[in-house]
Image (spheres, helix red, strand yellow):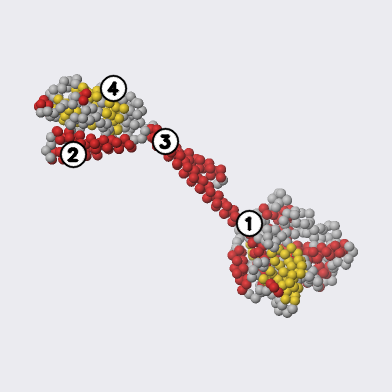
């Protein structure tokens, strides 16, 4: 998921969340508060009050300024708190003004109590206030009870409670919240008071007192209800704050997820990068012939025949010092540099008392430059490991010792005076073109034989070289060829086949098709390289597939194209190299067979390489421009 999609995702998520938040808050924003009712809830009437007498004037306010409509409802709960049958009320209310009139005579009802509800509706919600009516007889007034005149309802008479904003019951037509959900606490409290009153000698005055006493409690309740009800503006602000907080949280969450994802990507990327450094960079050929080797990605080989080498090499690293190859650095005297690559250097040195020889020996010391990466370090470690496993063979460069106690690491090799076979051959071509004696066909066939011998030995030790080419063969003053450069060599004793995991620059032109396309390396891919090496020897160090870019080489090899027979190379010799280039690795010869074939050529007096026919201008050396190993 890209950063953009993460942002879009978080925006959508926020929107959905806000919609959900706003949905309930919509209700809040449109919340219609119930009307607030002001009335005297304890009416004291006289049985002689005339019909039409104004009993109470209900006042109500509505926050939303809705049109209010007043009403009366008989209660099924009588003054004692008992359930009774609904009685018709002797009152009527003007539903516009809220004035309550007596609409039938109360004569003969002195001493009765009536419970009823005054309702005020704003069209949506109904506020219900319970009222208790106490009908007095003429005698009651005579004994001194003062009847509260309507005008006196704001007074503070002992029996008449002062004007109060009474608890109201809000009933929404669409809501299931109703009387029963609000009323029980008040009722229960009232009921218990009434029960107490009953047990302590019930009389109406006590009830009035009980009701009056209940006022403060109800006032508290009312306050509570009121405090729970926020104004629409408050609600709106609160909703906004809530939405903002949730948006911030969601945004934070989104950013958190995105950051986490980014971190994971970075970790993955760095892992991939280090893997890239260790993964083969070969791929199917693109049409762009000027491809960059670093960008190559091979089709993933489906055979994993070799376990990861990093782990293995770390172990080697530890074991490195556990043997007697270690040589004291101070016994090395540096002469001059023999050559250097991007990351490594080879120095000509003098070693004192190295190996079994006493006195001084000229040696070649391989080391790494300061800019060398872990990959190059591991290659050198690997080279050392492979060389340690070898005994002396005249066609393989010999390890004399190493300095691995600290950086820089030194790999001490036998000094091979003539340098690289590739340079040697090219120098000979130059010499020849200038009329010098140059090399003979027999010399060259001898090189083929010697390298085959060296490789036969390595194969017998379970080593595959993986970079067999004239540049990695050293030649001494006696024209003895020695296989060198085991940086990519691997011990495949157990598996016979190695699936390469790494490499930066690749020796494309020396690689077998299965190595190029499937990363598979075996002694048979070394055989393929050996065939190319014969071609190099025959052409005096020319670059294979002259005139072709590496991508073309790969494509042509896949299509079955092979290096042409150089005109000056006899068919017998060309057949040997061609034999090495069989598409099927199994059909390629072994090094032993190649040793025998080369030996056969040597024993034969024929010149299989007719150097006098060497076309000086047909072959040339290509400099590596694309990072390809040449
Ligand atoms: P390399 O880094 O393997 O290409 O070697 C760099 C240079 O060092 C080449 O020119 C080689 O000829 C030279 N060299 C490498 N190993 C030896 C050796 N054992 N004896 C003499 N010269 C060597």
Q: Nearer the viewer, mark 3 or mark 4?
A: 3
State whether residue 129 is above or below residue 323.
above
Q: Nearer the viewer, mark 4 or mark 2?
A: 2
Q: Nearer the viewer, mark 2 or mark 1?
A: 2
Is 318 placed left or right of 332 in the picture? left
Residue indicated by mark 3: 237
Q: CA distance from mark 3 to mark 2?
A: 42 Å
Q: CA distance from mark 2 to mark 1?
A: 87 Å
Residue indicated by mark 2: 193
Q: Earlier in the sequence, mark 2 or mark 1?
A: 2
Q: Earlier in the sequence, mark 4 or mark 2?
A: 4
Q: Earlier in the sequence, mark 1 or mark 3?
A: 3
Residue indicated by mark 1: 276
Q: Earlier in the sequence, mark 4 or mark 1?
A: 4
Q: Nearer the viewer, mark 4 or mark 1?
A: 4
State whether residue 280 is above or below residue 85.
below
Q: Kindly indicate whether the residue at mark 2 contacts the one at mark 3 (C-beta within 8 angstroms).
A: no
Answer with the quarter of the image where residue 602 lies.
bottom right
Answer with the quarter of the image where residue 242 lies.
top left
State whether residue 579 is above or below residue 170.
below
Q: CA distance from mark 4 to mark 2?
A: 35 Å
What element does badge 3 sit on? Answer: helix
Residue indicated by mark 4: 96
- Work out whether residue 113 can be spotted: yes
- Work out whether residue 363 can be spotted: no
Q: CA distance from mark 1 to mark 3?
A: 56 Å
Q: CA distance from mark 4 to mark 1?
A: 87 Å
Answer with the quarter of the image where residue 227 lies.
top left
Q: 556 or 319: nearer the eye? A: 319
């Amino acid at each position: 998921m890209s950063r953009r999609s993460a942002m879009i995702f978080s925006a959508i998520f926020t929107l959905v969340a806000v919609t959900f938040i706003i949905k309930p808050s919509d209700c809040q924003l449109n919340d219609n508060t119930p009307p607030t009712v002001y009335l005297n809830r304890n009416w004291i009437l006289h049985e002689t009050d005339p019909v039409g007498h104004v009993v109470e004037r209900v006042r109500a306010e509505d926050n939303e300024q809705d049109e209010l409509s007043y009403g009366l409802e008989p209660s099924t709960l009588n003054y004692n708190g008992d359930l009774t049958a609904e009685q018709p009320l002797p009152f009527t209310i003007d539903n516009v003004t809220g004035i309550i009139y007596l609409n039938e005579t109360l004569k003969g009802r002195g001493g009765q109590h009536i419970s009823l509800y005054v309702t005020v509706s704003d069209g949506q919600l109904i506020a219900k206030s319970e009222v208790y009516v106490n009908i007095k007889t003429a005698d009651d007034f005579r004994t001194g009870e003062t009847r509260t005149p309507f005008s006196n309802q704001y007074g503070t008479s002992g029996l008449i409670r002062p004007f109060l904003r009474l608890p109201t019951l809000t009933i929404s037509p669409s809501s299931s919240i109703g009387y029963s959900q609000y009323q029980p606490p008040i009722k229960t409290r009232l009921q218990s008071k009434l029960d107490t009153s009953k047990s302590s000698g019930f009389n109406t005055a006590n009830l009035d007192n009980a009701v009056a006493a209940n006022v403060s409690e109800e006032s508290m309740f009312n306050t509570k209800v009121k405090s729970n009800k926020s104004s629409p503006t408050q609600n709106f602000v609160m909703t906004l704050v809530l939405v903002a907080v949730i948006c911030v949280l969601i945004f934070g969450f989104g950013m958190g997820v995105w950051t986490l994802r980014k971190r994971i990507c970075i970790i993955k990327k760095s892992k991939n990068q280090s893997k890239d450094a260790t993964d083969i960079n070969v791929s199917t050929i693109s049409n762009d012939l000027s491809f960059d080797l670093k960008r190559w990605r091979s089709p993933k080989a489906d055979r994993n025949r070799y376990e990861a080498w990093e782990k293995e090499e770390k172990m080697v690293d530890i074991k490195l010092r556990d043997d007697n190859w270690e040589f004291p650095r101070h016994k090395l005297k540096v002469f001059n540099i023999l050559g250097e690559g991007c990351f490594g250097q080879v120095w000509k040195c003098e070693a004192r008392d190295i190996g079994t020889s006493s006195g001084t020996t000229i040696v070649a010391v391989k080391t790494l430059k300061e800019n060398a990466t872990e990959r190059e370090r591991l290659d050198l470690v690997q080279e050392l490991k492979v060389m340690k496993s070898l005994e002396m063979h005249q066609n393989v460069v010999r390890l004399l010792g190493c300095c691995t106690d600290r950086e820089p690491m030194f790999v001490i090799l036998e000094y091979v005076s003539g340098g690289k076979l590739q340079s040697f051959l090219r120098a000979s071509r130059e010499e020849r073109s200038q009329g010098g004696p140059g090399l003979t066909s027999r010399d060259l066939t001898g090189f083929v034989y010697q390298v085959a011998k060296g490789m036969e030995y390595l194969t017998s030790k379970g080593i595959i070289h993986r970079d067999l080419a004239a540049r990695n063969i050293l030649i001494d003053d006696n024209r003895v060829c020695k296989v060198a450069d085991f940086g990519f060599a691997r011990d495949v004793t157990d598996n016979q086949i190695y699936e390469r995991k790494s490499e930066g620059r690749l020796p494309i032109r020396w690689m077998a098709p299965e190595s190029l396309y499937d990363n598979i390396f075996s002694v048979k891919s070394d055989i393929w390289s050996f065939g190319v090496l014969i071609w190099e020897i025959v052409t005096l160090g020319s670059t294979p597939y002259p005139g072709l870019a590496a991508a073309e080489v790969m494509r042509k090899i896949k299509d079955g194209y092979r290096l042409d027979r150089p005109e000056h190379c006899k068919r017998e010799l060309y057949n040997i190299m061609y034999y090495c280039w069989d598409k099927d690795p199994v059909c390629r010869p072994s090094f032993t067979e190649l040793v025998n074939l080369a030996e056969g050529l040597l024993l034969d007096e024929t010149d299989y390489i007719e150097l006098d026919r060497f076309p000086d201008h047909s072959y040339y050396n290509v400099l590596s421009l694309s990072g390809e190993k040449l």
